[in-house]
Amino acid sequence: MAPNKSTDAVLNPFFAKVLDGRPETYFSMWTITEEGRRDPAKVQAALVLASKGLKKLGGRCRLYVAMGGSADLIGVAKGPMDGQLDEQAMLALQRAIQASGILTAVFFKAFEFTADGYAKYTEDIIDGLSRR
């Protein structure tokens, strides 16, 4: 089913705009493939590709090495403080990184909230649903 922007922005945060004006955060949970394990230089090259691609989009990132769990590396990317990243370009960048055959990824977007901010966010969702 095609997204319905009038209701999905309320029901699905993926279609929503950031409520507090802060940029969204993108997470890439990367697993190094067997090919990457055989040639660590290729992993480094894939990470450089990711970093350069994100910078071209106006974003910034941090890389974390996971100590347990299903991911080997976790990339955390944010857009510029005065705007958001182009989601289609972010998805294309993820596909390009995975096409290298060195990393596979679970990729998702999230919004950061304080406890009070999340309470306001859920109130806005409930208010939006009650107006339907």
Image (cartoon, helix red, strand yellow):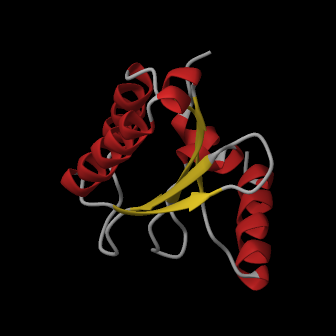
- Looking at the image, which residue sits at the far left? 56
At a point 35% along the width and 59% down the height, the residue shown is 84
Query: Does residue 69 appear left or right of residue 83 in this picture?
Result: right
Q: Residue 107, image x and y in percent? A: 57, 39
The quarter of the rendered structure image containing the C terminus is top right
Q: Is residue 51 visible?
A: yes
Q: Is residue 9 visible?
A: no
Residue 31 higher or lower than 17, as above or below: above
Residue 65 higher or lower than 50, as above or below: below
Badge count: 0
Q: Residue 86, image x and y in percent? A: 32, 46
At a point 57% along the width and 30% down the height, the residue shown is 4
- Looking at the image, which residue sits at the far front? 38
Residue 116 higher or lower than 11, as above or below: below
Residue 58, picture quadrant: bottom left
At a point 56% along the width and 27% down the height, the residue shown is 3
Residue 88 higher or lower than 86, as above or below: above
Relative to the observer, which residue lies in front, 118 or 48?
A: 48
Relative to the observer, which residue lies in front, 30 or 76?
A: 30
The quarter of the rendered structure image containing the N terminus is top right
Q: Residue 126, image x and y in percent? A: 80, 59
Query: Does residue 120 appear left or right of residue 82 in this picture?
Result: right
Query: Does residue 15 appear left or right of residue 117 in this picture?
Result: left
Relative to the observer, which residue lies in front, 114 or 50?
A: 50
At a point 57% along the width and 61% down the height, the residue shown is 64
Residue 90, picture quadrant: top left
Q: Residue 14, image x and y in percent? A: 58, 45
